[in-house]
């Protein structure tokens, strides 16, 4: 049996995935070129402007930098802010899975 | 011994609010509501009422304060009139959509432009579709009793309630009003239980964007989309009629005062001619019915107490034997006719009621309408229908239409 939503007003829990997989909205995907990405090239924590600017908080401050595509809406801010231009926005239709 | 005081409608409203013990009041003064906001502030200042009275810079803010306070679990009250109510329009939708049991008084006044401070129903009528229950009071006792019932109704169905009463005609006119015992009110009105409470211990996001489709949340529950939430509100409205009637019945059992649930009737049992309306004009129509009966015309009155939810089944029952219907109403849907008239016709559609309806638009911006004028109008309606004129008509009474 379906688990019914008993809320009578628009109540949500602040939690990952509460609004569904918002990554489904994306039509362009950020793709990172590891040869240009500063922390990867230097092999130590540095830059991370993509992490800082991401409005969805889906970029990790790790080496290598990872983007959670379940929730990345494809806004392209990371690509815009990346100093070495390591992030390219690629149309989803052109992605070869 | 009963406590009967000779007071205005605004004072009766303030006493009712005090008895309901709201935790938060936010109101911005506007004629003819002003005295209500003032008396409440005096109760808070003197300590007679333990509530927080939050001063605001506008009506939009006063309702916003009530919405916020209601969300965190407080019983709330606000009041306004005319353009103040229109300024609240967005927040009216917000309160209803959030299913918050806010109770508000609308002291009915004509809407500008041009400015009027005097009575008609265009203000609350314009807010008909905001998802609020609307109850119209016939006299000052009804105002006091209805406000107390309004909290009971709102907190049971989680729909905000607008208690409407006529500016000046009731708000500034003194009548004897029986003040109920505080202990009895407490018994009638259990404490407010919010459906959701905002608290740092259990954080919630409320009223974020809802999409056209349903969505699965983080716990895997398929959550309603916008349209499903709206349907829940409509379903609650469909159940609210029964709750309004129950509240009225229980209050009558405790106090001996029955103002009707959704409608009230006066000498309709054998009536060939039924006069109808909302608020004090319907009370005045009872005097007209008496005068018509003196002339040998079997007249009666149906007072519409609940305008939303509209009492569809009750009006069909009440009007089924009438051969002529005269509506007296203080509002109009421009380009069509009065709102009560349209709703009655819609309720009668598909039933055996084929009675012609004359819709009298009366008293806009406080234009006087005397009992004798209601008598003449209703008699004209009956005579014209008896003469075989079966068409519906809209007539502006006491208006120089040129």
Image (cartoon, coloured by chain):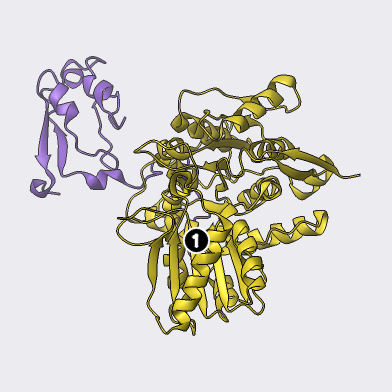
Chain colours: A purple, B yellow
Specify the quadrant of the image occupied by residue B321: bottom right
User: Mark 1 — on which chain does it sit?
Assistant: B
Compared across the picture, whether B264 is left or right of B319 comes to right
Residue B332 location, x and y as percent? 39, 55
Q: Residues within 10 Å of mark 1 (few under 14, many from 20)?
A: many
- Judge whether residue B264 can be spotted in this image: yes
Quadrant of image for the C terminus of chain B: bottom left
Q: Quadrant of residue B339?
A: bottom left
* Element type at mark 1: strand
- The residue singled out by tag 1 in the image is B328
Residue B210 falls left or right of residue B219:
left
Q: Does residue B220 appear anywhere in the picture?
A: no
Q: In the image, is residue A53 above or below residue B277?
A: above
Which residue occupies 45% across, 35% down? B84
Q: Residue at x 59, y 46 (%)?
A: B195
Q: Residue visible at 66% across and 32% down?
A: B23
Q: Position of residue B138 (x, y in %)?
A: 63, 53
The N terminus of chain B sits in image quarter = top right
B23 or B346: nearer the viewer: B346
Q: Position of residue B15 (x, y in %)?
A: 72, 37
How far across and down, in percent of the image, does residue B269 sit?
67, 77
The answer to whether A61 appears left or right of B140 in the picture is: left
Asked if B116 appears above or below B273 in the picture, the reply is above
Judge whether B208 appears above or below B324 on screen: above
- Locate residue A48 relative to residue B215 in the image: left or right: left
């Amino acid at each position: 049996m379906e688990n019914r939503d008993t809320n009578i007003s628009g109540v949500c829990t602040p939690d990952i995935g509460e609004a569904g997989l918002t990554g489904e909205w994306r039509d362009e995907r950020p793709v990172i070129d590891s040869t240009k990405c500063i922390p990867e090239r230097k092999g130590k924590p540095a830059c991370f402007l993509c992490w800082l600017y991401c409005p969805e908080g889906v970029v990790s401050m790790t080496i290598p930098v990872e983007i959670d595509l379940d929730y990345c809406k494809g806004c392209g801010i990371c690509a815009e802010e990346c100093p070495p231009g390591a992030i390219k926005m690629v149309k989803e239709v052109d992605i070869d899975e | 011994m009963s406590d009967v005081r000779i007071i205005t409608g605004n004072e009766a409203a303030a006493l009712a609010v005090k008895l309901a013990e709201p935790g938060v009041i936010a109101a911005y003064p506007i004629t003819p509501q002003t005295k209500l906001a003032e008396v409440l502030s005096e109760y808070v200042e003197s300590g007679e009422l333990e509530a927080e009275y939050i001063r605001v810079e506008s009506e939009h803010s006063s309702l916003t304060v009530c919405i916020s306070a209601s969300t965190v679990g407080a019983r709330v009250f606000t009041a306004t009139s005319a353009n103040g109510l229109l300024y609240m329009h967005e927040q009216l939708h917000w309160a209803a959509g959030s299913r918050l049991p806010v109770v508000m008084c609308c002291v009915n006044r004509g809407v500008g432009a041009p400015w009027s401070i005097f009575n008609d129903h265009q203000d609350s009528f314009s807010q008909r579709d905001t998802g609020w229950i609307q109850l119209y009071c016939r006299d000052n006792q009804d105002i006091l009793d209805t406000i107390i019932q309004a909290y009971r109704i709102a907190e049971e169905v989680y729909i905000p309630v607008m208690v409407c009463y006529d500016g000046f005609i009731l708000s500034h006119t003194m009548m004897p009003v029986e003040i109920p015992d505080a202990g009895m009110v407490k018994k009638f009105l259990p404490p407010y239980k919010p459906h959701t409470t905002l608290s740092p211990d259990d954080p919630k996001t409320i009223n974020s964007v809802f999409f056209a489709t349903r969505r699965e949340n983080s716990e895997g529950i398929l959550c309603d989309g916008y349209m499903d939430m709206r349907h829940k509100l409509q379903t609650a409205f469909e159940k609210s009629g029964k709750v309004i009637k129950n509240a009225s019945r229980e209050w009558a059992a405790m106090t001996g005062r029955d103002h009707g649930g959704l409608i009230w009737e006066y000498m309709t049992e054998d009536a060939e001619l039924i006069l109808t309306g909302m608020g004090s004009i319907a009370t005045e129509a009872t005097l007209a019915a008496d005068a018509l009966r003196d002339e040998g015309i079997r007249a009666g009155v149906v007072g519409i107490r609940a305008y939303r939810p509209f009492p569809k089944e009750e009006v069909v029952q009440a009007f089924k034997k009438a051969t002529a219907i005269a509506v007296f109403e203080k509002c109009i849907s421009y380009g069509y006719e009065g709102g009560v008239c349209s709703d009655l016709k819609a309720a009668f559609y598909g039933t055996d009621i084929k009675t012609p309806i004359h819709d009298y638009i009366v008293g806009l911006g406080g234009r006087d309408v005397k009992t004798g004028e209601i008598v003449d109008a209703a008699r004209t309606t009956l005579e014209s229908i008896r003469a075989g004129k079966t068409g519906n008509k809209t007539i502006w009474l006491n208006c120089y239409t040129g």
